[in-house]
Every structure is written in C-alpha cells, then in structure tokens.
Amino acid sequence: MIKAVIFDMDGVLIEAKDWHYEALNKALNLFGFNISRFDHLTKFDGLPTKDKLNILTTEYSLPIELHSFINEMKQNYTMEIVHTKCKPLFIHEYALSKLKMEGYKLAVASNSIKNTIITMMEKAALSNYLEIMLSNEDVVKGKPDPEIYTKTINLLGLTPEECVVVEDNENGIRAAKAAGAHVLIVNEVTDVIYRNIRQFIDSVEEKKA
C-alpha cells in the first residue's frame, strides 16, 4: 500500500532548472567560465552545485580555490531569481492538498540547498503540505546516489515499497530507483497533477494485488 509521495523540486514542483543554470553561469562568467546549454542538459542537470564545480575543475580546469566564492554567488543569484519568478501554481496546490487530505505523507528531497528549498516551497505555497524537506546539506552524497531518498523514506517511517517518488531527470530517477521506491517520471511541472499521481498510485497497487 502506498503511504507517501516524495517530490523532487526543480523541474517537478518548481520550473527552476533554467534558474539554476542562469545563476551558475552568471557566477562562472565572473571568471570567464561558462556552461553550454547542451552540457547543462546532458551532463549537469540535477547535480548539486558542488558536483558541477568539481566537474568543471576536472574537465575545464576551473581553479578549485574559486569553488566557495562561485557557490556563494550562485546561491545569491538563484535567490534573486526565486524572489522574482517563484509563484504558486494551482495544479500543485490542488494536488498536494488533495493527497494530504487522503492521508498520504508528503515530502521533498532535492539536490538544492536547504534555504533554497524552504524559500521556494514557501513562495509556491506548498510548505504547509510537506512533512519533510531534505536538501543536499542533509546527506553526504547527492543524487544520483540514493542516500537522500533512503533517508527521506526512513524519516517518514516507511519502506521503499510504500513510497512513490516523482522525478524528472536522469540523476534523480537513478537515485529513486536505487532506493527501491516506485518512480513516477514526469517531463514538465505541468505533468505534476493530482490525476496523474493518483493514476500512478492506483496502477502500482493493482500490480501488488
């Protein structure tokens, strides 16, 4: 029996993938570095910023001494965008309120930092529906490692078989599957609607029956 739905944030509950891309590039541009759109989509999407910076150091000779400053500037630029663009989306408010009313535990597990998650969820009017919000600061390894989903499931007091994870990118999907959860894959934030989640839960439970 499914008892919880765990959401990734960027690209699932918030259309923020481009925000992170723009903010990191703005920080990198201070030092003459840049991530192409192609590399963003094929190599960097869904990774924590620290992992992106490590790749840039390994493959493009970004000085490791700049990591801390670039990371700090990236977070500042991200929050500027969030405060401008992050707004409630009715389909998500409806979906989460309906699922919570039906007794499901709801959580967010994201590779973003804690402050970004809390701010985005509050501005999207979703924080009141969530029991748990885990960030990359709550784990040793970010996605695609399953640690964040395993930890979320444990904190909810459930087994992986009792949880549905809603994910949109390869790193997150790999993490959720490795954690043993059922994975609902979406392409856009507009796919994250109550009907789609409900139908997926019903299909999982029909297979178990």
Image (cartoon, rainbow, N blue to C red):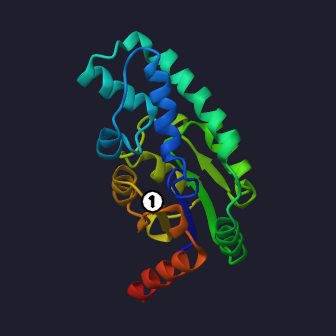
Residue 183 % position (x, y)? 41, 66
Residue visible at 49% across and 35% down in the picture: 22
Q: Kindly tell me whether residue 139 is visible in this rendering.
A: no
Left/right of residue 196 with respect to residue 33 in the rendered view: right
Instruction: Residue 8: give x, y in percent of width and height.
Output: 51, 54
Q: Is residue 188 above or below residue 118?
A: below
**Who is closer to the viewer here, 185 or 162?**
185
Q: Would residue 24 appear left or right of 101 to someone viewing this image?
A: left
Q: Determine the residue positioned at 58% across, 60% down.
A: 157
The residue singled out by tag 1 in the image is: 167
Q: Is residue 34 above or below residue 154?
A: above
Residue 141: quadrant of the picture: top left
Q: Quadrant of the C terminus?
A: bottom left
Residue with the most extreme top position: 65
Which residue is nearer to you in this view: 127 or 83? 83
| Left or right of residue 110: residue 145 | left
Most distant residue in the left direction? 59
The percent coordinates of residue 107 (x first, y second) are 60, 57
Mark 1 burial class by Cα count in 10 Å: few <14, some 14-19, many 20+:
many
Q: As rendered, which of 131 and 20 lies closer to the eye?
A: 20
Disc 1 marks a residue whose amino acid type is Glu
What residue is at 44 percent from the left and 21 percent from the top? Answer: 29
Q: Residue at x 65, y 73 (%)?
A: 99
In the foreground, 166 or 15: 15
Secondary element type, mark 1: strand
Q: Where's residue 46, x and y in %?
A: 41, 45
Q: How many marks?
A: 1
**Up/down of 91 relative to 82, above or below:** below
Q: Quadrant of residue 207?
A: bottom left
Quadrant of residue 126 in the image? Answer: bottom right
Above or below: residue 8 compared with residue 59? below
Say whether residue 94 is visible: yes
